[in-house]
Image (cartoon, coloured by chain):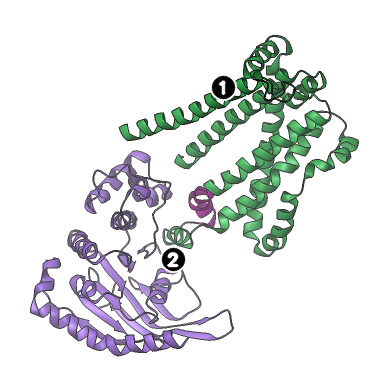
Amino acid sequence: MAGMLEVRNLSKHYRRDDGTGVHAVDDVSLSVAEGEFVSVIGPSGCGKSTLFSVIGGLVGDYEGDVVVDGQVVRGTHRDIGMVFQEESTFPWRTTLENVAFPLEVAGMPKAEREEMARRFVRLVGLEGFEDRYPSELSGGMKQRTAIARTLAFSPKIMLMDEPFGALDEQTRMLLGDKILQIWRELKQTTLLITHNITEAVQLSDRVVVMSFRPGRIKEIIPIDLPRPRSSEIIATDQFGRYVGAIWQLLREEASRGMVEAENV
Amino acid sequence: MRQSTIMSAKVAFVGLGSLAVLVAAAEYSVDAGWVSPFILAPPTEIWSAAVEIYKEEKPFRALGLTLGTTLAAIVLAISIGLPCGWALWRYQTVGRAYEGWLGALFASPKLLLYPLFLVLLGRNVGMLLIMGFVTATIPIMLKTREGLVTVSPTLINVGKAFNMTEHQILWKIMLPSAVPIIFTGIRLSMIYTLISIVALEFLLNFEGLGGMVGEMYDRYNIPAMYAAIIFVILMSLIYFRIVQRIQTWLRSV
């Protein structure tokens, strides 16, 4: 079955300021079917964020192809919505104005876009906070605002780069539940970049494990856990076995990354 | 909300209370003979002088002239400084090459150039306006560039991810994000321009608040001189309030 999102033989080299080269991603091919939730996991320096930037069209000059719904794309694409790891809400806009932003850019009339934005604000559980500015929200709420804003863009594919990376473990678990609930409602094709094994297993249909630099796909693990899921699933033996198996694959790669970081 | 009202009341009380104490101390120190009335006029006399000026000297004309010239210089500086600041950001080599020079120029006392401008343009409002404009433009240019340079790359990527054009990203993301820093530049330019224009009015014995202060000084009318200075301070206060309001309004648009 052709995927909604396909990455074909993708390689990316960077040149550092000192003139040396970095082979960030090497010959990566993966496919995400329509409505599927796939996570890419790997140690720091495995090219996860490069993969995110290339698929999202923020970085050019790579080898291989990014294919969206059968069409090879270059650059940013209307069908790909991105959620960033860093703080990305607009501090001068309220929650509702942030969420309505892509609709405003698209020229939707005010009343219509506000109504639609309210729907997504409700979906991410921020009802009652519509008129708050990001400075008045917690980290988790800001990320939910960013997710709602991307959902309002109505992309076919959600591309998320460690959206909960800066949050504590408990908040991360609860937001994972929220993501599962949204995914159940919208059946959004999702590619999540993460370094958190629990998060990857909790949310995904498949987990793509990457090697340390140059980032290659080491293994793809289907997660055969029942849906609908919630964070309670982490207490099951099956969940633990998946986490253990992924850690086995990652451990060697993470060690290589750590050794390299210490030798710099 | 209640908490913030109480806080505002406390702030107002401390501010006005300190002013009252200062005024009382000034009055008493002159009355007691600790300070010569030729150095510090008693506030009661300053008040009488202010009333006198209000009746006879038509301070609103002077205020209007200084305020009008300063505002015109700032508006001109914004209309030229903002696009120049954008160009300094857009063309990085030019921006980096000029940043140091502009910084040095900003720090230099441009007021010293007044004899040159006096010869070139004559002793008129136009000359004050041009000197005010020269003073005002540089901080606006520098701060506009700084504001645009420091916009978070993630916010720009959000715009790209939403398929926005470069023009849309500039207007919808970069400028609102840079507004606080740009307004720092506008505030700086207001301070320096007001100082320049009032100082020039004083030096050239021109109309306006600076001229009024100079005239009182020449007459050795110390209370009236202080009263005129207070008019200048009041004008700065009104000015800053206006800019604060504009900044808040601009970000909400």
As displayed, is residue A113 above or below residue A216? above
- The tag on residue A223 is none
Q: Residue A117 appears at what percent x and percent y?
A: 30, 47
Residue hosting label 2: A76
Q: Residue A29 appears at what percent x and percent y?
A: 34, 83
Q: Quadrant of the N terminus of chain A?
A: bottom left
Q: Is residue B166 magenta?
A: yes
For the question of whether residue A150 can be seen, the reply is: yes
Q: Is residue B94 magenta?
A: no
Q: Chain of mark 1?
A: B
At x 37%, y 74%, the residue is A67
Q: Main secondary structure of the magenta part?
A: helix
Q: Chain of mark 2?
A: A
Which quadrant of the view contains residue B48?
top right
Observer-nearest residue: A58 or B126? B126
Q: Colour of chain B?
A: green
Residue hosting label 1: B24
Magenta residues (range)? B165-179
Observer-nearest residue: A64 or A210? A210
Quote the CA–CA distance across marks 1 and 2: 67 Å
Which quadrant of the view contains residue B187?
top right
For the question of whether residue B1 can be seen, the reply is: no
Q: Colour of chain A?
A: purple
At x 69%, y 27%, the residue is B68
Q: Residue B204 appears at what percent x and percent y?
A: 84, 29
